[in-house]
Amino acid sequence: MDSTNTTDKRSRYTIICETQPAKLPRYEWNAEYDVIKFFPCKQNWSKKLHPLEYFCCSIYTRGALHFKGTIDIHRFVTALQSTLKNFDFLFCRLHKHGGHIHVSYSENNDDFVQLEIGDNSSTSMLPEKVDARILTGISDDLEGLPMCALKLTKLEDDFTLGYLFNHALFDQSSVFYFFKYLANCYSNRNHAEQLRNPELVKFDSLPPQNSPVFRDLNEFRLYGESEGFQFLADKSELIKKMTSPFPGTVIDVHFKLSAISQLKAESEFFITENDIIHALLLKIYTMDPKFFPEEEQHFSFACNMRKRCGLDETVIGNVVYSCKFVLKTELIRKSNLLELGQFNRKSLNEITPEAFKQYVMWYGSFPQFSQIPKDYISTTFIKPLHWCTSNWSSFNYQEISFDFQEVIKLTTPSSATLVAALGISTICFDNSRGEKTLNVTVGIPTHCLPAVREYGISTELFETSIHT
């Protein structure tokens, strides 16, 4: 690497001055604190958030990709430089302007993307030396929040890439493409196989054929409820629920993918492993004897809408729609897993681009009624018998390869209390020990724990452990 090193004693930063044929983001490496800050090439960049993006901007999606093998830090930094040049919106911060939220470079030019370097002494695989407001993953205080923070942790014979991305611009597909792009820059230094540059989604370019018309605020809110969102001006009870200890047991469920694939092969109708995993989650949730047979269980899961809308993986943003269905408790308990998997598959097959575009249009109508997106809360957060999951393992992570080092595990440090209290789960994976497992964290009543464990043993489809 052709570089000149100087030491700025006032800031205690080592300045790495790159000699590159094309202008790349400048970076400063604080050797004392193992923090690298990348600064943008441009002077200005700004975007007014679409109401859908505004709704998501208080949330940070976070996780860690685990790799077996070693990585060259200097090559990694150079690759990150190249990546950030084309992901320049990641240098932005959230700012309020006249009742609206923008992502833009700051007036004081204090814009950077931070990379931490960790080792065996690191207490977390996630970035830690960041604004305290984003460490919990949720923040109501938005002013000046960064778009992301990264951490590279080098262990004895493996490494991890931890991340925090603001949900305003990033869903899990966007996270996947960012790391795929970064790995490509690292592995193909001559750019012989350059990937296409990312582009932010333009929601206004996705108009529905039949735009929903809301004559008044009541109709606007009723449509929101049909999409799974409820107006909630007073959030005190929700905050109490989210911050109180879960009164049950939080467990990690480890789904045996090979066994689930064998069961899937027995179905006379097309279903996937994911359909069966959702069926297993429904079985686990309805083991609670307090649920009456006629009570309805509401189940929803995230669906990536890019392919359905004629978009590809280079499109960055929240191009996600909630696929949902309702089943009575008695039906879930009596149905076998293949039958439940068919219900899941049917609901997914019924999702249309038009439905997603109308959903986006509803968000676009927030200014019409002077509504604040963050006052509308997912029903899953508020009501019982509502469950929600997102499968982060569904992407082709083999495409994220640093030379020949492929992802062996994806984890997310979900708050146990949040997951347990709100009925939300994120499906990750682990193939570091030979057999691939899909893992999820759920909260159940303590008295249900023996039944859940026994069901896993009898079906041979999953194992459980107490979440720590």
Image (cartoon, rainbow, N blue to C red):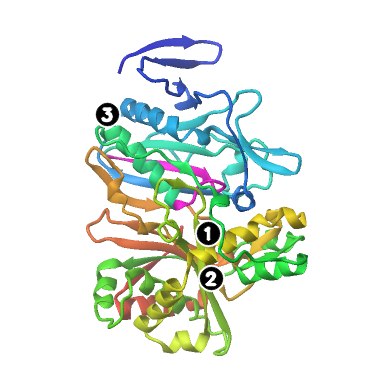
Of the residues tagged 1 and 2, which is closer to the observer?
A: 2
Q: Is residue 264 left or right of residue 93?
A: left
- Give the residues drawn in magenta, as a range: 158-172
Residue ranking furthest to the front:
209
Q: Tell me if residue 161 is in the magenta stretch.
A: yes
Q: Is residue 208 above or below residue 344?
A: above
**SS for dot 3:** loop
Residue marked by disc 2: 387
Residue marked by disc 1: 416
| Category of crowding for the residue at label 3, using alpha-carbon neighbours closer than 10 angstroms: few (below 14), some (14–19), many (at least 20) | few
Q: In which quarter of the image is residue 293?
A: bottom right
Q: Quadrant of residue 211?
A: bottom right
Residue 189 is tagged as: 3
Question: Could you say where residue 375 lies in the image, as x and y percent from the top left?
Answer: 71, 57
Q: Tell me if residue 305 is in the magenta stretch.
A: no
Report how far apart the C-alphas of labels 2 and 3 lie in the structure.
Answer: 45 Å
* Most common secondary structure along the magenta stretch: strand
Residue type for callout 2: Trp
Residue 106 is tagged as: none
Of the residues tagged 1 and 3, which is closer to the observer?
A: 3
